[in-house]
Image (cartoon, grey):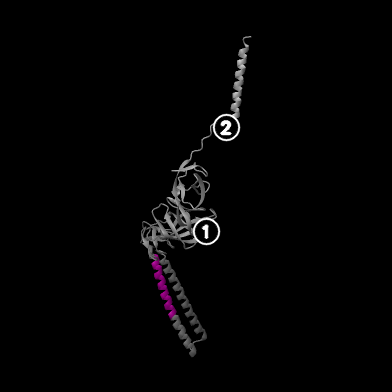
């Protein structure tokens, strides 16, 4: 009988606890504390300056001499004289080296003597033929004798022609003992000593014309139509330090390279002062089309993930603006956008995305 009040109290507490739980469930998410809004990222804005610029294509290629040739003698013999040194500038026709010419000189002398003998014999034969023709007219010589004398005179003239040909051949062989420069240039390689016996066609000298260089490079197929032969090009040595704005487009070939599918282009680079070094790499900045309105922004403001773009601040949010890069400089880039820009975000972090909340420093 005494346990009944305790049971009643326990039942009452259970009902109160159950009603409390049901009340908490009824309130649901509305009773939870509101979530904190994402913090705005601090960004720095830099000015975008308006400029006039043309689209450019940066390419790299090798600087070749305007002319380059490896030279050797057309005949064999012993190298007797080397008249030039490495690095020496020579003119067209200058003698670079000579072979021993004792035998060739003797052959020329023999051919000259043979020609003189043939000419003397021909003179005598002509005189005899003339006398025989005169006597034939007087009836003192037969027709056969006169014709024989005329034939002998013609044979003697032929021997003169043969002797002259032999002399020309001997003189040509003698000239081949002197190696001459086929064009003006700089001696890049030359023998260090004489006395060696060289075979015909053996390369002994390297001659290059470096007062004008040829930059060979390639461009994409879509760029080819925008290049104009004769247009000015800026060329800079890959190692830096030297450049020229006087280079010109010489050739744009109508056939692409079979391996790379790119179009070969040749540029003439003036080098009278020797600022560029032949057979080294250089960069060329090719102008593509006429100048147009563009924007100059720091290179640190340009992002390239998913395409070239910059970020601007619009109503406290970052907004992505796609751009076309016309020219890349050391610290700045020239771009073209579809809308006017006055300021862009500098050094955009990974968290700066399209629509992200930002605050300007």
Q: Is residue 338 or residue 161 the one in the foreground?
A: 338
Q: Earlier in the sequence, mark 1 or mark 2?
A: 2
Q: Residue at x 48, y 77 (%)?
A: 155
Q: Is residue 10 or residue 170 the one in the foreground?
A: 10
Residue bearing mark 2 = 30
- Helix, strand or loop at label 1? It is helix
Residue bearing mark 1 = 224
Quarter of the image with the C terminus is: top left
Q: Which is the main secondary structure of the residues drawn in magenta?
A: helix
Q: Nearer the viewer, mark 1 or mark 2?
A: 2
Query: In which quadrant of the rendered view does residue 94 lie?
Result: bottom left
* Dot 1 crowding, Cα within 10 Å, few <14, some 14–19, many 20+: some
Instruction: Report the disc number at residue 176.
Output: none
Magenta residues, start to end: 103-123
Real-space Cα distance between discs 1 and 2?
A: 66 Å
Residue 281 at x, y percent in the picture: 44, 53
Asked whether 114 falls inside the magenta stretch, the response is yes
Residue 280 at x, y percent in the picture: 43, 54
Q: Is residue 57 or residue 38 the one in the foreground?
A: 38
Establish if 106 lies above or below 226: below
């Amino acid at each position: 009988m005494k346990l009944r009040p305790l049971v009643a109290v326990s039942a009452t507490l259970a009902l109160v606890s159950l009603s409390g739980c049901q009340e908490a469930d009824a309130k649901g998410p509305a009773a939870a504390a509101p979530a904190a809004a994402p913090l705005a990222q601090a960004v720095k804005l830099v000015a975008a300056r308006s400029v006039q610029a043309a689209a450019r294509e940066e390419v790299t290629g090798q600087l070749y001499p305007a002319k380059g040739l490896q030279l050797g003698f057309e005949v064999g013999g012993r190298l007797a004289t080397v008249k030039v040194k490495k690095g020496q500038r020579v003119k067209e026709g200058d003698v670079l080296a000579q072979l021993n010419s004792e035998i060739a000189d003797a052959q020329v002398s023999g051919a000259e003597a043979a020609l003189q003998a043939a000419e003397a014999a021909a003179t005598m034969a002509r005189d005899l033929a003339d006398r025989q023709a005169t006597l034939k007219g007087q009836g003192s010589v037969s027709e056969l004798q006169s014709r024989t004398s005329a034939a002998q005179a013609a044979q003697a003239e032929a021997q003169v022609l043969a002797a002259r040909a032999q002399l020309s051949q001997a003189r040509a062989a003698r000239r081949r003992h002197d190696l001459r420069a086929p064009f003006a240039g700089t001696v890049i390689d030359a023998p260090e000593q004489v006395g060696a016996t060289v075979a015909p066609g053996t390369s002994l000298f390297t001659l290059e014309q470096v007062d004008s260089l040829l930059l060979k490079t390639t461009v994409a197929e879509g760029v080819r139509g925008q290049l104009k032969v004769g247009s000015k090009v800026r060329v800079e040595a890959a190692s830096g330090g030297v450049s020229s704005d006087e280079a010109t487009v010489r050739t744009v070939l109508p056939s692409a390279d079979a391996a790379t599918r790119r179009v070969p282009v040749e540029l003439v680079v003036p080098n009278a002062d020797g600022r560029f070094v032949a057979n080294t790499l250089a960069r060329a900045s090719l102008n593509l089309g006429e100048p147009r309105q563009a924007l100059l922004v720091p290179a640190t403001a340009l992002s390239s993930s998913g395409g070239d773009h910059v970020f601007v601040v619009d109503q406290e949010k970052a907004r992505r603006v796609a751009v076309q890069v016309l020219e890349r400089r050391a610290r700045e880039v020239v771009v073209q956008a579809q809308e006017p820009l006055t300021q862009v975000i500098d050094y955009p972090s990974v968290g700066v995305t399209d629509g992200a909340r930002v605050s300007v420093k």
